[in-house]
Image (spheres, grey):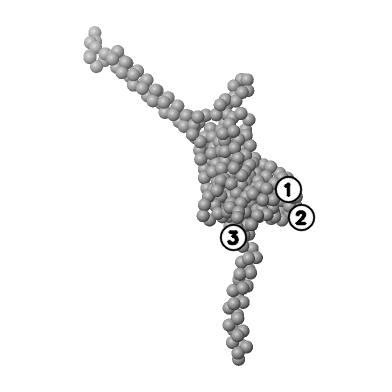
């Protein structure tokens, strides 16, 4: 007959140990779920904003490139910037010509008529930004050409114009007949070209609108708009405004400098 020693007795978990283990396991699972949920929520919030950043970068780059090479549009319209509203949304217009164009067909040059304008997007309260380009010299410089979508999901578009002293909300005279007045009586923003243009775009941070089973669009989110702003200097403004006047002044200065030499030669 063999006797069982205390070490050979089978031992198990007590009820208290099971309760503590279950509580710790529940805490770990809850923390894991919360971390995963936070990561998914952050991803859903970042993805649309990353798309907005890309759209804003592309739109700003296109407008900036065209404005840096801006030149007078026609003999009647040098540069036009009109302040416009679509409901309660600011949607300004911009019309000018640019040398930022690569000829693609015969009888085309690097001169291109350009327009930037906004249009409403259904009932969402947002607007889309479009660009019109016409590489041919048309009788109406404000029409013709092809229109392309630049950016969508905007909550506003604003252009401001700098004449070297002040900023203006509009630029140029829409009615060419009013240009018959003396240039000295015109305001600085009614003739010529601006020195710089400030561009401001407001985007919906979540442009992807959802729809219910009936297909009706849900109202836009109440999140604050994402604003992007930049100032572009028109590099060709000085050349287009001075033109032949600068050449005439240089010629006159050279003549005055040569006069003393001519007088000396005559005296000799």
User: Residue at 42% of width from left, 28% of height from top?
Assistant: 35
The answer for how far apart the CA atoms under marks 1 and 3 are is: 26 Å
Label 1, residues with CA under 10 Å away: few <14, some 14-19, many ≥20: few
Disc 1 secondary structure class? loop
**Which image quadrant: the C terminus?**
bottom right
Q: How many marks?
A: 3
The answer for how far apart the CA atoms under marks 2 and 3 are is: 28 Å
Q: Which mark is residue 140?
A: 1
Q: Disc 1 or disc 2, which is closer to the eye?
A: 1
Q: Which mark is residue 107?
A: 2
Disc 3 secondary structure class? helix
Q: Disc 2 or disc 3, which is closer to the eye?
A: 3
Q: Nearer the viewer, residue 239 or 16?
A: 239
Q: Is residue 47 visible?
A: no
Q: Which mark is residue 262?
A: none
Q: Is residue 264 above or below residue 105?
A: below
Q: Is residue 61 above or below residue 260?
A: above
Q: Is residue 153 left or right of residue 30?
A: right
Q: Which mark is residue 238?
A: 3
- Mark 1 or mark 2: whose residue is earlier in sequence: 2
Quadrant of the rendered image containing residue 93: top right
């Amino acid at each position: 007959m063999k006797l069982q020693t205390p070490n050979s007795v089978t031992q198990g978990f007590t009820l208290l140990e099971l309760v503590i283990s279950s509580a710790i396991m529940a805490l770990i699972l809850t923390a894991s779920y919360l971390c995963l949920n936070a990561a998914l929520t952050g991803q859903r919030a970042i993805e649309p904003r990353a798309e907005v950043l890309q759209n804003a970068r592309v739109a700003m780059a296109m407008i900036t490139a065209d404005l840096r090479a801006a030149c007078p549009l026609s003999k009647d319209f040098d540069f036009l910037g009109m302040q416009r509203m679509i409901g309660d949304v600011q949607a300004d217009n911009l019309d000018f010509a640019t040398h930022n164009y690569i000829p693609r067909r015969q009888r085309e040059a690097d001169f291109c008529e350009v327009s930037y304008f906004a249009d409403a997007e259904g009932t969402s309260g947002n607007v889309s930004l479009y660009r019109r380009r016409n590489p041919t010299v048309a009788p109406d410089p404000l029409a013709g050409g092809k229109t392309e979508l630049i950016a969508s999901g905007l909550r506003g578009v604003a252009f401001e114009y700098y004449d070297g002293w002040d900023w203006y909300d509009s630029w140029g005279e829409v009615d060419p007949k009013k240009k018959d007045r003396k240039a000295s009586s015109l305001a600085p923003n009614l003739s010529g070209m601006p020195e710089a243009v400030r561009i401001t775009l407001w985007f919906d941070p979540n442009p992807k609108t959802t729809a219910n089973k009936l297909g009706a669009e849900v109202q836009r989110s109440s999140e604050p708009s994402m604003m992007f702003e930049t100032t572009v200097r028109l590099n060709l403004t000085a050349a287009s405004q001075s033109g032949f006047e600068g050449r005439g002044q240089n010629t006159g200065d050279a003549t005055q400098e040569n006069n003393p030499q001519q007088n000396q030669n005559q005296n000799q």
